Amino acid sequence: MKYSDLCEVYERLEATSKGLEKTKILAEFLGKIKNEPQIIYLIQGRVFADYDERILGISQQLAIKAISKASGINEEGIVKEFKKIGDLGKVAEKLMQNKKQSTLFSEKLTSQKVLANLQKLSTLEGNGTVDKKMGLIIELLNSASDKEAKYIIRTVIGDLKIGIGSGILRDSIVEHCFSPENIEKKREKSEEVQSAYDTTTDFAEVFEKTCKNKLKEISLSPGRPVKVMLFPKAENIEDAFRITGKPAAFEYKYDGFRMMINKDENGHVKIFTRRLDNVTNQFPDAVKYVNEYVNAKSFIIDCEAVGYNPKTKEYMPFQAISQRIRRKYDIERLEKELPIELNVFDIIFCDGKSLIQEPFKKRRELIEKVIKQQKFKIVLAKQIITSDEKKAEEFFDKALEEGQEGLMAKNLEAPYKPGARVGYAVKIKPKGNDFDLVITGAEWGNGKRAGWLTSFDVSCRNGKELLEIGKVSTGLKEKEKEGTSFMELTKILKKLVIKEEGKHLQVKPEVVITVQYQNIQKSPSYSSGFALRFPRFKMLRPDRGINDIATIQEVEREEEKER
Ligand code: AMP
């Protein structure tokens, strides 16, 4: 397919903010890429499947250099334009337009070529990488029209701005492949396609299989990350029983972080967080534990890794071990200083067989069978099965006494639904005044703090839409050694800048933090319609992504409760 045809669709998608219209445009377009399903990645603003961890590694600076080389305009000129326009794609469009007036160019660029060059970016390593990467981008820019240049640059820097999330993509596949005649049918097919996506996290494969009527062939495959099942919140034990039915399994809700540990037929272990980041290298201890103490050839187990103090053997809150998730060096030392215990609570694949359709009680029986428990290495989540509210309350108190977060209540008959927040299990926590939110903007500090970002705009979500709810400027440390510092957060956010306006930056919504607050007020100052009073940074949540942040409905509920 010609890249210009794809760009025309990008333009149409960008021109409307209405989900239904976008779905219609895409559904029609999908017919043209049946034989090239990977073009779907470009529509997502990516070049690989969602589960694929390879990154292009192109900073804004490098993109500016590439535009400069391709357009013949010096870098300062480009930075100046960027400050004015605020969108590097549009800058490329404008500058290439000037150039193209004097050059002859033919409409030869194909989407496959764009995909191939951009995919190559992630494979380059070692000496001369930067030049080679630039070469690949410049090659594309040189054969691109001005419009094409805009979308190439946007894709390269990971900000396509056409507003296509996984919901719209799913709906367009349903629309294109089934043209459902009524709402019932539409819902049924949406669920099938969504479930296939949550299992593979690869829209190209889902599209291809849906077209060929082979959705049923989609299955789990250890080594390829699968989305974790999510849990809604119950107000209390009674509410939990109402959702799960009686009897229910109650388990400790451990205060650590989620790990999906995969072992394939060839014995390779891979560990993913709930945002599908591969953290295998950071956790050689976990790899060792599953190799030694899980008696199965291949599996996918779902567990919570909890930190403990190696000297006192006391469990520690997530905060204390969170640095292990991102740390790429000193792994051995961290492994000793911040050891973890795996608390296994589910298994969804074992010895060549998917178990997601099996009832929870069967899956629990299986982990009891295949896992050889070793205190402080790998254990099963503590569990009781009861219909008695009092017994559950006592168990709840015990969990809190032992420093855990609360309880999970689980429906014994329920299957496992990757990616879905269904009431097959619910969490019960004591009321805590904090939310996980995503940073969407930041502001440079003054005086002593000049050079650091010192105030952070935080947002919750309504579906896919992000809504601001406050500004956080306290709780971070001045010095790096004392915990998360302004400097550390500045370093992280500087890589995510989308737009700069005076002292204010708009950043890609990728950094999730826990924010404590005193109370919530209705407020016209923020797009959510609410403001957190006295918001305070509590911790970074590198294991969580944008889908894990608080929803506006949760905020509303908390605000109502406070009244
Ligand atoms: P929340 O992070 O508040 O949405 O709570 C859900 C999280 O609790 C899960 O994603 C797990 O990381 C964690 N968790 C801790 N213990 C358990 C357990 N026994 N069963 C399921 N999830 C658990």
Image (spheres, rainbow, N blue to C red):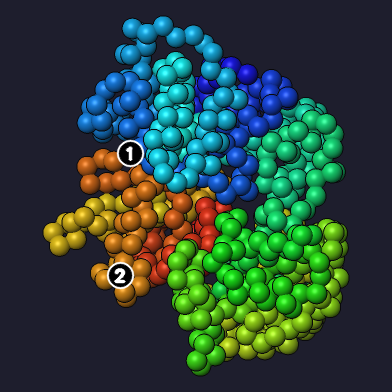
Whether 429 is drawn above or below 494: the answer is below
Q: Position of residue 400 (x, y in %)?
A: 58, 85
Quadrant housing the N terminus: top right
Badge 2: residue crowd in 10 Å (few <14, some 14–19, many ≥20): few
The residue shown at (70%, 85%) is 374
Badge 1: residue crowd in 10 Å (few <14, some 14–19, many ≥20): few
The residue pinned by badge 1 equals: 61
Query: How many numbered circles are shown?
Result: 2
User: Marks 2 and 1, Cα distance to the nearest angstrom?
Assistant: 26 Å
Q: Position of residue 273 (x, y in %)?
A: 59, 61
Nearer-N-terminus badge (2/1): 1
The residue pinned by badge 2 equals: 480
CB under 8 Å between discs 2 and 1: no
Q: Position of residue 384 (x, y in %)?
A: 76, 83
- Classify residue 20 as left or right of residue 45: right
**Secondary element at tag 2:** helix
Nearest the camera: 133 or 97? 133
Residue type highlighted by circle 1: Gln
Residue type highlighted by circle 2: Glu
Nearest the camera: 283 or 375? 283
The residue furthest front is: 127
